[in-house]
Image (spheres, rainbow, N blue to C red):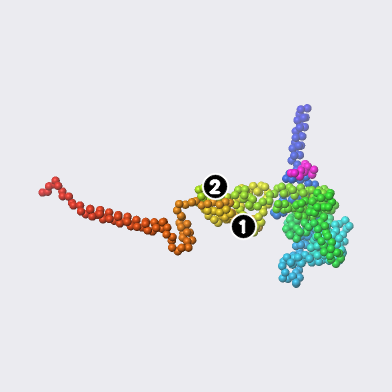
Amino acid sequence: MVKSMRRFLGLLLAALFAVSLLPFSFAHADDYNEMYPELLEQGHLTASSVILIEADSGKVIFEKNPDTPMYPASTTKILTIWLALTLAHQLPVSEGMANASEQAIYEEQLNTKYTVSEAAVNIAPDESSAKLAAGEQVALIDLCYAAMLPSGNDAANAIAEGLGGTRENFVNLMNSAAVSLGCTNTHFVNANGLHDDMHFTTARDMAILARIAMQSEEFRTIVSAPSHIMPRDNIYRARTLENRNNFVVKSSDERKQSRYYPFSTGIKTGTTEAAGNCLVASATRDGINLICVVFNASSDASRYSDAKKLMEYGFSQFISTTIKEIYEQNPRVVDVRGFDLEDEQVGRLTLDLRLSQESTGKDLIVMTREEMEYWVQNFSSMTVTEFTREFKAPISAGEVMGTLTYYAEGEAPVVYDMIASRSIAARKQLAPSIEQIYADAENDPNPFPRLTFELVFLFVILPIAALILLIHLLKMLFRFIKAKRKVKAVKPSGRYYR
């Protein structure tokens, strides 16, 4: 009986140990505590595949099955719109714009009108539409808004036909662009995201595409717009397109208002039966820029809540700071010579930083908390200090003592002036220094020196006294020599000669 019990306990412990080695996450979405966003686990998310990156560097912060092939649905339009804006730079320039600025030419190309074909608007009733009409002439920029805000498949088709000649040619350009950007697990067969078994990507690849696209100012403007007014054209009067992304725009429906994220800056939702509920989102807070991809969330609402959890986790991991803020944790202190003996800090001077007018770099650094600690400990080795002023009193508060420069990789340097935090008086001297004498002489408007006791003593009394002393010494010397000559020789006595 005892042996059987021991064998059972041994098997139970072995089984528990084996289970502990399995990569299971017992966390559940309901276990998530929004008061502690830094404790996010994979199990807190309903989506099948997610990734979170820091947008400026591309650094991955959080991931869950990021390389699993997924159907992107209408998030495909991120590449469609970015590619359209990129190709607009390559459109032919009209003769009247030959001497115009680059920006003016680009704006003209964005306003180039394309005729919407019958095939472009021939979509299924359940597809998202911008309500374009066959034969309608629409500017390229308006087609981009129509494809993004209401997620119009008809607008995406019109873009593909207008810029690619055919939809197939444009899709080939999309796939070529994806490969050139480093998306090795992506293949698209259309410009709108309509389901196809061969139309797939990964969360990692989509994050790459979104990061590149968000570097375009025009793209950021489009994806963050709450609405857009399409001007009157050859068929319709002016009409307003509304952004359906509840992460970006607070819905008028109270049930959907919780989906809104106040720090959101874009970008695109996507939904099909095969893809599930998808969302590619961007957000900015305190100079920290994040992008997350949520694929196949359990519900429409869950894709927004998953994105919020990811964003809050990301913001909890990063610190937005400046060179000055890091420096102030351990400022430079120098010793000043020639300070007044009554100085309470015995000549010790703390140098403050002030952004130089010559600085052209971005004075903002985003880093993790671990990187922050490293920066504080190794600040002097990560910046260049050059002193331009001698550490000698007197010194005035605010006086520039030198410069401190930070060279960010691939960016303009950030330059600070190192200034005195306080004034330090010079030590009082009994006699003027040689430098002071020269300075006084140069600043004296009188070409002749002022008659002072010092000058009288130096050039009159002292030479006369020296002359009198010299004459007196010479007289004593002559007397001594004369007295020595008058001494007679003494005759020897007590000696006999034979």
State the residue position of label 2.
345
The stretch in magenta equals 25-36
- Give the residue drawn at x 73%, y 56%: 211
Q: Residues within 10 Å of mark 2 (few under 14, many from 20)?
A: few
- Front-most of 24 and 445? 445
Toward the bottom, the furthest residue is: 95
Q: Is residue 197 left or right of residue 103?
A: right
| Place of residue 169 in the rendered image (x, y in percent of width and height, measured from the top left) | 80, 63
**Residue in front for this viewpoint, 254 or 161:** 254
Residue 99 occupies quadrant: bottom right
Mark 1 vs mark 2: which is more N-terminal? 2
Quarter of the figure with residue 362: bottom right
Q: What residue is drawn where x is 75% and y is 39%?
A: 20
Whether residue 200 is visible here, answered yes or no, is no
Residue 66, compared with residue 170, is above or below; it is above
| 105 is within the stretch colored magenta | no
Q: Say above or below: 260 vs 165.
A: above
